[in-house]
Amino acid sequence: MQEVAVVGVGLHRFGKAGDAIVGNKSVTELCRHAVDMALQDAGISWRQVQAVSAASSRFSGGKGWGLNGNDVVEDLGSTGVPVYNLSAGCAAGGNAFNVGWSLVAGGVYDVVLVVGGEVMPKGMIQTAGTEEVTDPEFLRQRCVGIPGPAFWSMLARRRMHEFGTTEEQMATVTVKARRCSVGNPFARFQQAITLGDVLNSPYVSNPLRLFEICPVSNGAAAAILCSPQKARQFTGKPVWVAASAVATLGFDDSLPRNLAGPVPTGPSYHTEVMGAVRKAFERAGIGPRELSFTELQDNTCYYELAYPEEWGLCEPGEAEHLVEAGETAPTGRMPINPSGGFVSFGEATTAMGVFQIAEVTWQLRGQSGARQVPDASVALAQTNGLGGNATAAILKR
Amino acid sequence: MSESVAPAVAGLFVADEHGVRVLGAKCEACGTPYFPSVPVCHNPACPGSRMQPCGFGGRGVVWSYSIANFAPPPPHKYDQPFRPYAIAVVDLASGLRLVGQMVDPPEAVTVGAAVELVIDTLYHEQGKAFTTWKFKLV
Ligand SMILES: [Zn+2]
């Protein structure tokens, strides 16, 4: 195995279909913008890319078959490069990064493009849509009726029961996230909001409110990964991948993802996420308290409270106090999502894992302006997605 | 005239002299409960799948819950006008952690509350009441 460097990153600012940011741009147009930016950042040309690892979308482009990487290659110029299209729900971008990393680390290629982009459908995302009684998701929706955010609100409600978390404390997480997004040129929302704004927004799934749940967005992200030898040719300041890990959930996972499961004997948490994050810490030889900051998947404010505790970044039940004390802000002792996170960007599902790599890279280079984590030297990026997929990457200077 | 009644999906639950149960399966080799039923045990530590049909009912405790403040998209069906409902995750004494709607109004539901499995109407269509399993505070 050889070291892997991130030498270039790019984003298309996130927005809502039809707005002034993304308008009616296709996923291919969004990706082209992000890839051009990443190539320019790396100082290389498209023809130097030896392979493409692409997050594949079920929503848009990809010829209806999730062949989003092929769309990108056609658009940039068909050089005949191998393309890996990867599907893992909201973890697809993280998966694409992991496969890109594996290809370079294993010495198969020297220069790999990782890309993810999304044009999301309007409104609540529907499941498969088939009315098959053999489809567990159909049964969940027909027999119970579980809107997407209900899963998150079940977890939030349980945390309120276990730790006495208040709705004000959860709202404070969102206020912090939106404050980070001010001045981030790539965030969809770039304005701070108040505690009152959050608490006055309607419940989407009580106890979670509209401003506490990330909306869907359109956007794209790209990263160029390189072998050490190539990296030294391209840039004087590469960012290094200390670890990249992927995991799926364990049989002992007892979160209410399906209609039913065994009553657990231990605690209930995201086992796929724990699996990926633990592996990343082990492989990097870096402990959870050594991180300069973390970019984690905050589909809702709950995760900014639960994940740092589950991963050992802080003690169980401590997260609310750290948030209130400002310790999760970029200048705090446990910065979480200095980018503004999913709550400020909205979720362009397959782009998210790559968007995190872009933010981490800029932070580690010291290029993040007002949201810069002082002297950032090592950071964790984490995604999870439908099907029990999770990814974790640790990057360092 | 009594309303005609049918299950929203046939074969998933039953109410008889033994009470209300959802119809799943249990692996006799490792004890893992399943609902709906699966043909083969999914437990990677199972010494060898031995699936038997098994019903799960009775009482349980609310592990957590959420409230559907807005109607879920199809294929969910509901009566107009939409009324918010609680969705409970219940740890049944019979060993199954089961998700279902609450009969009771959302404000009445709490984590840790004792509930029992019941059959209740989910929606009406063409003069028929379609039913599903739900939980009710005891
Ligand atoms: Zn078994």
Image (cartoon, helix red, strand yellow):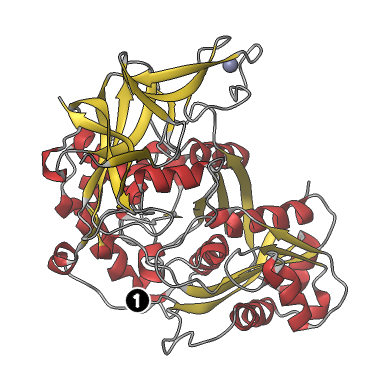
Q: Nearer the viewer, residue B116 or A113?
A: B116
Query: In the displayed structure, would residue B30 be above or below residue A102?
Result: above
Q: Nearer the viewer, residue A347 or B3?
A: B3
Count of numbered badges drawn on the protein: 1
Query: In the displayed structure, would residue A120 be above or below residue A254?
Result: below
The residue under the point 44% across, 24% down is: B23
The residue under the point 39% across, 56% down is: A298
* Residue holding disc 1: A189
Can residue B52 be seen here? The reply is yes
- The percent position of residue A226, horizontal first and vertical second, equals 74, 63
> For ligand 1, which image quadrant applies?
top right
- The percent position of residue A377, horizontal first and vertical second, equals 50, 57
Element marked by disc 1: loop
Say whether residue A160 is left or right of residue A108. Answer: left
The residue under the point 16% across, 51% down is: A167
Say whether residue A373 is left or right of residue A179. Answer: right
Residue A279 occupies quadrant: top right
User: Type of residue at label 1?
Assistant: Phe
Instruction: Name the chain letter of the residue that bears numbered label 1.
Output: A
Disc 1 residue crowd, few under 14, some 14–19, many 20+, Cα 10 Å = many
The quarter of the rendered structure image containing the N terminus of chain B is top left
- The percent position of residue A311, horizontal first and vertical second, equals 43, 39
Residue A45 occupies quadrant: bottom right
- The percent position of residue A335, horizontal first and vertical second, equals 36, 56
Query: In the displayed structure, would residue A359 be above or below residue A328?
Result: below
Say whether residue B133 is left or right of residue A118. Answer: left
The quarter of the rendered structure image containing the C terminus of chain B is top left
